[in-house]
Image (cartoon, rainbow, N blue to C red):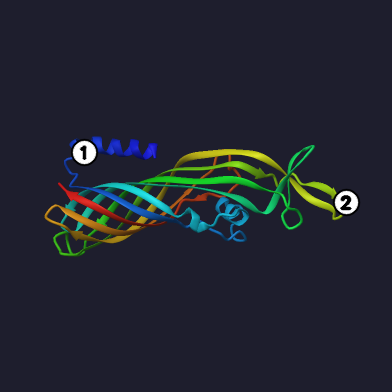
Amino acid sequence: MKRLTALAAGLLLLVPSLAFSDSFQLRIGYFMPRASTDLLAHPDSLWAIELDQMSFAKKDFRSGMLGFGYEHFLGPNLSLALTLDSYAKRESGYYNDWVVFALDEGDFAFPYELYDGDDVLHSFRVGHTPLQLSLKLLPLGRRARLIPYLGAGASLVFWSVSMTGEQIDFSDPWIYEDPELGDVDIFPVVGLNARERGTAFGWHAFGGLSFPIGYRATIEAEARYHSAKARFEDWFVGFEDFDLGGLALTVGLSYWF
């Protein structure tokens, strides 16, 4: 949210110098990540692994978003738009199939189906703020009673991914000699504080309807599809590129200068 505020302030400072800025928009919406849940098709996907191992689900990462935009009218049927949106969601959960016990050597994850212990907990946070440049086509022009539009363009996405809490180290298996069950595979439980952020390039496409309210204002309802992937370079190296894409549904108010 701090990054969104700084970028929005930067855009607002540009308004006096941008004589071509013909409208300003403020919108709110709801973002639904594309996040893959197919672990067989994407065995190295952080999305797929988290959604398979942890108690939270894909729908838990749907969340509200806030956006700003400027639009330059190139003609009666064409505009150039610069928009900025922000989405962030954190979910906390537990490993579905494991519980934790403290041994002399440290904390270890034991199979849930065999033991009744404490949950192994961590949180997973995803955030991104795409800055988007778009061409917007209005087939009926901008003076109709109902103004349909569609468009597409390029995106520069500021993203962040973090995980904090406890993690099971499946790369370091141990054997626990249970007096009743025999040898049981267990794994160390370690502290987790992993964070990465960066920028990624992508694209977007959208369509919507504008409803004039007076001479200078419109209400807009829009569906926008985002596509971008982040490349990990630090904590999450070894995972495939992280999918930042998804569908955003928004409503907004535009004021024409």
Q: In this view, does 32 lie to the left or right of 256?
A: right
Q: Which of marks 2 and 1 is in front?
A: 2
Q: In this view, does 32 lie to the left or right of 141?
A: right
Q: Quadrant of residue 56?
A: bottom right
Residue 251: horizontal and vertical position, in percent? 29, 56
Say which of 126 and 98 sits in front. Answer: 98
Say which of 10 and 90 sits in front. Answer: 90
Mark 1 closeness class: few <14, some 14–19, many ≥20 residues within 10 Å: some
As drawn, the label of residue 235 is none
Residue that lies at the very extreme toward the left in this rendered image: 215
Q: Is residue 233 above or below residue 211?
A: above
Instruction: Decide which of tag 2 and tag 1 comes sooner along the chain.
Output: 1
Q: In which quarter of the image is residue 11?
A: top left
As drawn, the label of residue 15 is 1
Q: What residue type is labelled 1?
A: Val
Q: Name the residue under label 2.
A: 179
Q: Is residue 27 left or right of residue 113?
A: left
Instruction: Measure how far apart labels 2 and 1 are at the Cα level.
Output: 74 Å
Name the image quarter holding the N terminus.
Answer: top left
Residue 230: horizontal and vertical position, in percent? 49, 46
Q: Is mark 1 on a helix, strand or loop?
A: helix
Residue 192: horizontal and vertical position, in percent? 61, 39
Q: Is mark 2 on a helix, strand or loop?
A: loop
Instruction: Please name the residue shown 53% across and 58% down the image.
Output: 36
Q: Is residue 14 above or below residue 256?
A: above
Residue 45: horizontal and vertical position, in percent? 57, 52
Say which of 148 and 78 sits in front. Answer: 148
Mark 2 closeness class: few <14, some 14–19, many ≥20 residues within 10 Å: few
Q: What residue type is labelled 2?
A: Pro
Instruction: Please name the residue shown 21% across and 51% down the image.
Output: 254
Instruction: Please name the residue shown 11% across and 55% down the image.
Output: 215
